[in-house]
Image: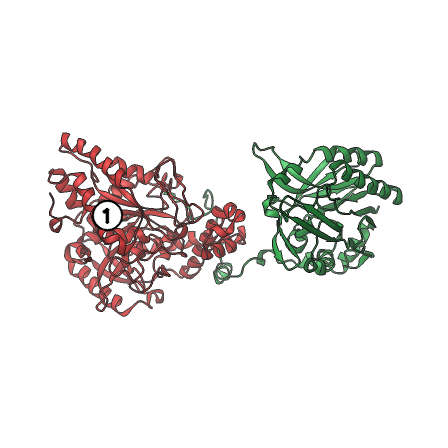
Chain colours: A green, B red
Amino acid sequence: MKLKVVGLQSGPNQAGGSYSERIKELTTQFNEAVEAVPNVDLIVFPELVTTPYFCKINDPSFFDLAEPVDGETFQYFSEKAKAAGVYIILPIFEKDESEGRTEYYNTAVVIGNDGSLVGSYRKTHIPKLCLATLTTDETLYFKRGTSYPVFEIKGYKVGILICFDRSFPEAARALALQGAELIVIPTAAGGEERKNAWLSECQARARENGLYVVGVNKAGDEVITTQSEEVQSSFFGLSCGFGPDGVAVVPNLDSEPWQMLSLEVDRQKVKECREKLNFLDFLQGDLYSAYSDELQKIRAYPVENETSPLFGPKGVVTID
Amino acid sequence: MIKTSAFPFSIAETHRLLRDKQISPSELVTFYLDKIEKVDPQVKAWVRVEKEGAFQRAKELEKIQAKTNEISPLFGIPYAAKDIIYTKGIPTEAGSKSLKGFIPNEDATVVKKLRDSGAILLGKVTTTEFANLGTPPETGNAWNVNHTPGGSSSGSAAAVAAGMSLMSLGTQTAGSISRPAAYNGLTALKATYGRVSKAGVIPASWSLDHVGAFTKSVEDTVLVYNEISGPDQSDSTTWTLPKQQLLQRENKELTVGIVVNDYFADMDKEIEESLMNSIQVLKDIGFKITMIKLPKSLVAANAAQHIVMKSEVANYHAEAYQKNSLLYGEYLQQFILEGLQIKANDYLKAQRIRFIFRQELTSLFEDVDVLLTPATPTPAPEGKAATGSPVYNIPFTNAGVPTLTLPIGFTKEKHLPMAMQLVAAPMSEQNLIDVGFLFQRETDWHVKVPEYR
């Protein structure tokens, strides 16, 4: 059985638009996708789908946009997921108060086709960038997540990376090593430098790990006006899907907003591709760290296994 | 009033004067605070001087002094604590930006023990950033302020050597007690790993860290060690070693093994000469002298020390580093970044190699009682941008075996101190004291003090 995936290249937030107006727009796009792709299994929204991209501005009032994983937006799309019988990956601005203190994350929520909360992934690489065409500081708002969960969706193992995470082969590899067959990458990216690398980054993550990659970006121009400044973001779109052989399974979208990308993930193809050449079989995991003379010396030094019953790392405690 | 010219420079002599009520704790505190005021603008050993606290403590002690003829060994003795050692209500910043303004609400166990013994905390002294190898303080060597005092316990050594304190507390993860002691002409015992509690001391690398004291003589070292050592509920690494009282005694029935590995061959010519003279002194006293080689695992063990230290430093700072790496100096930033990438497999292999090295090193003591090496390859290097090399100390910190650093002379041209390092088997500190005590009875390098204008 193949997994039918739709990526929604949502448009920007309207200047001064309300939350309910935004939800209305997203609902329209969602409904169109459900209608256009019969028996769709998984629908993926782009990063921070309900909010504007506020990370270019330092203004604590934006924290008001955050919501719990099972908050209002989840509740709404939970109903939609159940009604349509489809899984949804819903990226939100997360507020977590569960451990007695308040933390904020850039999170993608996984909603089951029965409306249940399957789980969530918190963005692990939080950019603070000052490029010619992109200046942003997400560290003002988000704490990093600390794990790479893999979710089961209709028997397929699906991992999530968010936006900047795509540029780190280690992150995709961590998912591949846990058996992921598909990595979805909800994104809200702009700037020429990042645009130029986007397709090849998604392609490389697919080929080097022998799995599907679906990159879902926002598209269009967005303006946030505050008391002191007017800040613009131009999301470049280019949502795309690559197969485990690194070849596009569907033509990538252009930079026009409100489009969708539809493709099928086929386990058989992952299998065939890995039978030919599976890079995961050649990993030298113990070597991938900073090189040093000291590491060379201790690795080259032969140590025989003994059975002396010491508690903890040896040599730490004197037992006499 | 005290005549400063006749003022004693050792704990032992000061103790006798206090016991006989010839001086008072307040007079002592006044003397040392004056000395700090006069000398520290040149040496820059102190992070902060606790003037009021010291006087208040001295007043309390005077009430006790008036009532009794029996005083505890460190009664009224002024001391300095390295700024990675927790002092209740007094900022403890570890030479770092990230702990700027941090005030502990508890004393470290060693500080508590010194307080119980009557010692008076004069203040906090400088350290390199988090007692690591990078980002040295401005502190100068007590014998020539244009040279490094060594590190990481830079202020601890400089303060005592410059006569601004009778003793000080420091720590060693690679060579941070032995090296500054050597560079400043001091006597310092780094005891067996686990002898002195580390509770309340900010870790550099917990499986390598040792706490110890800088003093002017073996006699003073014994007095301080007997007070600060012993099991501590709050530090599990101290639980397996019983409390031990070191003695000053005449024991010539010991064999000293001169370590002859190539590892120590790059030592400075003047240090080599002084070392030869000192070996002759030991021979004349009556110690048996023999030659010995360190185990072959030495090189791998040194690499293991590096890997373990990097891993543990990185682990300790990981969270703060992830939050804001710029709060760390360049050296530590790189050190932590590399440490975070070390795999558990390599870390554990490194710990096993350390264990093997310790076993092999310990087996040498079937033939000798004490090993002898130079304490440093060179005298204190010029400049303060770096703190000199700990390579001669690392093997013994790594093995957790006790070492004693003793002054053996001064360089001819610049009059900088030189030192030797004695090493004993785990838990055999007494052997070091036996050799050191008789050595200092025959030599006077340790009683020399620098002069300041």
Q: Position of residue A311 (x, y in %)?
A: 46, 42
A90 on left or right of B392 = right
Taking B148 as reference, is B82 above or below it?
A: above
Residue at 66% over, 39% down: A94
Quick check: can you spot residue A185? no
The answer to which of B356 and B12 lies nearer the viewer is B12
Q: Quadrant of residue B385?
A: bottom left
Instruction: Identify the secondary structure beneath mark 1.
Output: loop
Circle 1 residues within 10 Å: few <14, some 14–19, many ≥20: many
Q: Position of residue A185 (x, y in %)?
A: 72, 49
The answer to which of B311 and A252 lies nearer the viewer is A252
Residue at 72% over, 33% down: A72
Query: Numbered disc 1: what chain?
Result: B
Q: Which residue is mark 1?
A: B165
Q: Quadrant of residue A205?
A: bottom right
Q: Position of residue B435 (x, y in %)?
A: 21, 54
Residue at 26% over, 51% down: B159
Image quadrant in which the C terminus of chain B is located: bottom left
Q: Amino acid at mark 1?
A: Ser
